[in-house]
Amino acid sequence: ENTADTGDMYIFSSHFQVIDGQGNVCDVYPLPVDQYPQETPIGAKCTAQQAFGTVEESGNITVFYKYNMFDEKPTITFEIPLS
């Protein structure tokens, strides 16, 4: 949901880096998806899907999100348990 960006917001796989529970960097995994990223103006929402393949079976993954995909440091980090 774009709640503050006055320009159209567009987030896609290059904004993310995924690390499996063993510390391996994961890559985008080619799966068919039903919802793709779209430019999203302020006040609108976009639901999209993306798949990443893990190198090792993991109980959790770390997801780094970079608002500017060229920044070295992530904007926010998520620790996500897998079931």
Image: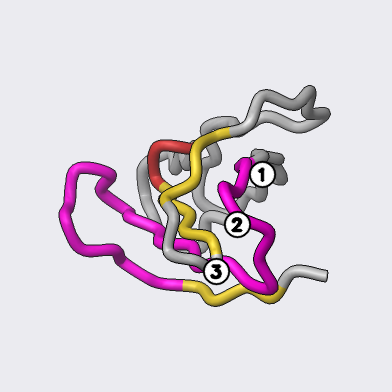
Q: SS of the residue at dot 2?
A: loop
Residue linked to disc 1: 46
**Is residue 64 a member of the stretch shown in magenta?**
yes
Which residue corresponds to the image point at 63% horizontal and 49% vertical from the top-left? 44
Q: Specify the amino acid type for callout 3.
A: Gly
Separation of residues labelled 2 and 3 (CA atoms): 29 Å
Residue designated by label 2: 1
> Picture quarter containing residue 56?
bottom right
**Disc 2 packing (10 Å; few <14; some 14–19; many ≥20):** few
Residue that label 3 marks: 21
Taking the spot 61% from the left edge, 42% from the top edge, the residue there is 52
Q: x%, y% of residue 70?
A: 19, 43
In the depicted structure, whether residue 73 falls above or below residue 47? below
Confirm or deny contact between disc 2 and disc 1 (CB under 8 A).
yes
Q: Earlier in the sequence, mark 2 or mark 1?
A: 2
How far apart are labels 3 and 1 at the CA level? Answer: 29 Å
Q: Nearer the viewer, residue 16 or 18?
A: 18
Is 6 in front, or is 20?
Answer: 20
The picture quadrant where one finds residue 28 is top right
Give the mark, 3 or 1, whose residue is nearer the N terminus: 3
Q: How far apart are marks 2 and 1 (CA)?
A: 6 Å
Q: Are marks 3 and 1 in contact (CB under 8 Å)?
A: no
Q: Residue 72 placed where, x, y %? A: 16, 55
Q: Which residue is drawn at 67% across and 40% down?
A: 51
Q: In which quarter of the image is the N terminus?
A: bottom right
Identify residue type, mark 2.
Answer: Glu
Magenta extent:
52-77
Residue 2 % position (x, y): 52, 55
Q: Where is residue 36 in the image (x, y as percent from the top left)?
A: 67, 29
Question: Along the horizontal axis of the image, is 16 left or right of 72?
Answer: right
Q: Could you say which disc has been placed on residue 62 in the image?
A: none
Tell me the amino acid under the disc marked 1: Cys
